[in-house]
Amino acid sequence: MNNHEIDYKLHGDDMQFVEVELDPNETVVAEAGSLMMMEDGISMETIFGDGSSGSAGSGMLGKLMGAGKRLITGESLFMTTFTNTGSGKKHVYFASPYPGKIIPMDLSEMGGKIICQKDAFLAAAKGVSVGVEFQRKLGAGFFGGEGFIMQKLEGDGLAFVHAGGTIYKKNLQLGEVLRVDTGCLVAMTHDVDYNIEMVKGVKTALFGGEGLFFATLRGPGTVWVQSLPFSRLASRVFAAAPQTPGGGSPGEGSITGGLFDLLGGK
C-alpha cells in the first residue's frame, strides 16, 4: 500500500461536499481552491506537481514533467496538501465548484487507474498520481474537443471526482458500445476502448445541436456519465446574460424596458 488510507463521508445531495477524516500524519492532496473548511491541527502546504511518491523520488526534472502534464489539462501547476499534525483524528472538507455529485473511487478495486475528464479531479489520498492521458488515435486528437485531453489517476488509494447534474454509472460488457456526448463523459476504467467518431449526416451535424463528434466507448469496463456538463450550463447562462455593455437596461423584460430600448435609451 503506497497511498495513505483515508476515511470519508459525503454530505448533501445536488451540491455535495466530502468530509475526509485523517489519522495523525495522514495526508490528502486536493486541487487548489477546493477547500471548504478544516479543523485545527491540520497543516496546509502548497506543492509543485501532484505530490505522488513517484514524482517526489525522481528529482526536479520529474516534478517539472508532472507539473507540465497538469498544465496541459488546464489545471494549476500547484496542488495543496492537508496533513494531520495533531494527536487525534482531524477532519478536512472539500466542495465541488458547481452543482453536481462527488464520486469516491477506490483505485485499488479498479486496476490502479481511472481515466477522467480534465476538470473532474477534486481530491485524493497522498500517493495518487494525477497525470494526463493522451488518446492514441488521430481522430480523437484532432477533433475530440473536450474528450481529447483527459486526466489519469493512478495508485491504490481513494480519489474523489466531481461532475455536474446526475451521475449515471454503466457497466459495459465485452464488445458492448456506448456513444456519449464528449462533454457528458466523466470517467471510465482503463480497460474501456475509447475513440471519437464524427456524427453521420450533414443535417444532423449542422442542425442537431449536439456538435460534430461524440465519444465511442467499447467494453468491457465501467463508465460514468454526467447529465449536466459545466460547459453546457455555462453556455446557457452566457446566452441568457444581458448583451449590453452596462449589463442590461432599466426595466429589462418589461413593457417600459422595451419602450426605453425602442427610443434609443442608454
Image (cartoon, helix red, strand yellow):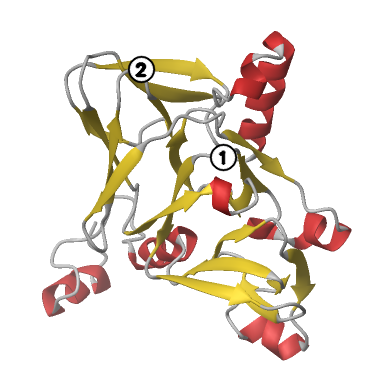
Counting other residues with Cα less than 10 Å from the Cα at mark 1, is it few (<14), some (14-19), or many (20 or more)?
many
Position above or below: 148 against 196: above
Give the labeled residue for mark 1.
Answer: 156
- SS of the residue at dot 2? loop
Mark 2 → mark 1, Cα distance in angstroms: 18 Å
Amino acid type at image mark 1: Asp
Give the residue furthest to the top. 59
Residue 151 pos. (x, y %): 62, 45
Residue of label 2: 25
**Residue 141, position as x, y percentages in the image:** 80, 55
Residue 109 position in % (x across, y down) = 56, 53
Earlier in the chain: of badge 2 and badge 1, it is 2
Q: Residue at x 72, y 81 (%)?
A: 176
Secondary-structure class at tag 1: loop
The quadrant where residue 54 appears: top right
Q: Residue at x 27, y 54 (%)?
A: 16
Q: In the rendered image of this protein, does residue 166 appear above or below residue 41?
A: below
Residue 50 in picture, x, y percent from top left: 55, 27
Q: Residue at x 60, y 67 (%)?
A: 222
Q: Quadrant of the N terminus?
A: top right
Furthest-right residue in this view? 138
